[in-house]
Image: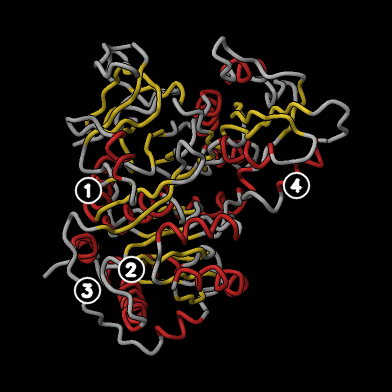
Amino acid sequence: MSNHLFDAIRHSIPAEDAVFIETGDNSTWTYGDMLQWSGRIAGAIDTLGIRPGDRVAVQVEKSPEALMLYLACIRCGAVYLPLNTAYTLAELDYFISDAEPRLVVVTPKAAEGIKAIASKYGALVETLDDHGGGSLIDLAKGEAPDFVDATRAADDLAAILYTSGTTGRSKGAMLTHDNLLSNALTLRDHWQFTAKDRLIHALPIFHTHGLFVATNVILTSGASMFLLPKFDPAEILSLMPRATAMMGVPTFYVRLLQNEGLTRDAVKTMRLFISGSAPLLADTHRAFQERTGQAILERYGMTETNMNTSNPYAGDRIAGTVGFPLPGVTVRVTHPETGVTLPADETGMIEVKGPNVFKGYWRMPEKTKAEFRDDGFFITGDLGKIDQRGYVYIVGRGKDLVISGGYNIYPKEVESEIDQLSGVVESAVIGVAHPDFGEGVTAIVVKKAGSDLSEQAILDALQNRLARYKQPKQIIFVEDLPRNTMGKVQKNVLREQYGNLYAISPNA
């Protein structure tokens, strides 16, 4: 009788009175608190009739209780389904209809809108607010803290995370207990986390980076974290003297560099700065090292695979690369059409294999089969190369995926919304290098003759149609879109043409 992931977490606890979480208002959660409250919430979920394998969809603000809910799902055998807090009701309808969760947990203010959707699919709705209240917590208070964990094997599902698909609709990546545990243990060891570490955690907890990388690494090392609701440079700098590590997206480092408080003295207790979820500009890497004396460690992962590569903890962290394959993970570069493995320094499709790689796409067996080679390698859709020293470089994405602020945006979804607007002939959405967001969502639009459609009119129309991070940073009007001889829009030409759109002048 064992619960594959939570047994490992339980085994990693240094002591029940050891600090697990400290919040911005200085409240503290010990590992004993974690065991009790994750147990109470697991009991509440069980009482609601949720059984092992049932999905629990969650769209709540970041809080210690939200992490307890994640752990509670692991403990009772439910499949945890985190949803971006920016998703609109229209977007949530798709996720709930596709995943068919038995329970949806949302903020109290969103409950009524969600209930109308959930009722169509037979899902229960409970609430959890960002201050630790709500109907789910009320239920949990009546449960015993010593919940008996459900038996879960290594290959049982632990979570489903939705990722962009080729049709513009998201696909549910199925992650097992061992996908999560194996990657957490590998990262813990590779980045040398111990119970003495204290992580600055300012990431959202509805995707891989903040939930599975940051949280699971801390849990499996028995370390502690400052759990912050959002990224605030001044607050981050004030915590650094008491912290040892930080995980962030490139935006974090850009904004820290804009703060005069970022000095070598300010980071003297910090041993590690990690960046991921979007490409880190080489200029940012160099500027941070010059200011602090520390080289940011960049790594590469995906929703489907957790982390695949990392720059070395001890060794050269080279700007513009994502380092070497992690222990136990195999990375190769193949010809995109033939699948033949390419030699060093040749660009092709990145493929990965290892215990971190997901089980497949939820209810999409044909799509799953198409994304895997016969020998088990997953075709990532990312283009890259491996140099003579073994460093991996990501040079582009085969499906024009845009990564802005660490979030994945599939252009087709944005284009479909723009193309429906009166006065629009067609549009092409691209990602353009952005110093703050990694890439800025940019829409190139062809208007109908005589239309007086403005940039602001399009932005206003998209406001309630798309999550904020999917909305374009800029709309550019053109007479025609560039096409090849087959009539396909040449987005590479657009990316080259507008490549400096968000560039900052050196003298700015």
- Name the residue tied to disc 4: 461
Q: Is residue 360 left or right of residue 86?
A: left
Q: Secondary structure at mark 1?
A: helix
Report the mark closest to the observer, 1 or 4: 4
Circle 1 residue? 182
Mark 1 → mark 4, Cα distance in angstroms = 44 Å
Q: Is residue 340 above or below residue 61?
A: above
Q: 10 Å neighbourhood of mark 1: few (<14), some, or many (≥20)?
A: some
Q: Is residue 432 above or below residue 57?
A: above
Local crowd at mark 4 within 10 Å, few (<14), some, or many (≥20)? few
Picture coordinates of residue 480, whole percent (x, y): 72, 18
56 or 195, which lies in front?
Answer: 56
Quarter of the image for the C terminus: give it: top right
Residue 149 circle label? 3
State how far apart marks 2 and 4 are (Cα). 38 Å
Give the mark nearest the N terminus, 3 or 2. 2
In the picture, the quarter occupied by the N terminus is: bottom left
- Give whichever of discs 4 and 3 has the lower sequence position: 3
State the SS at label 4.
helix
Residue 274 percent across, percent down from the top left? 42, 40
The residue under label 4 is which amino acid type?
Ala
Mark 3 belongs to which amino acid?
Asp
- Answer with mark 2 or mark 4, whichever residue precedes in sequence: 2
Q: Amino acid at mark 2?
A: Cys
- Label 4 to label 3, Cα distance in Å? 48 Å
Provide the residue designation for mark 2.
Answer: 73
**CA–CA distance between discs 3 and 2?**
10 Å
Kindly identify the residue that appears in the image at 47 percent across and 70 percent down: 105
Tell whether label 1 touches label 3 (CB within 8 Å). no
For the residue pair 223 and 486, the one nearer the viewer reads as 486
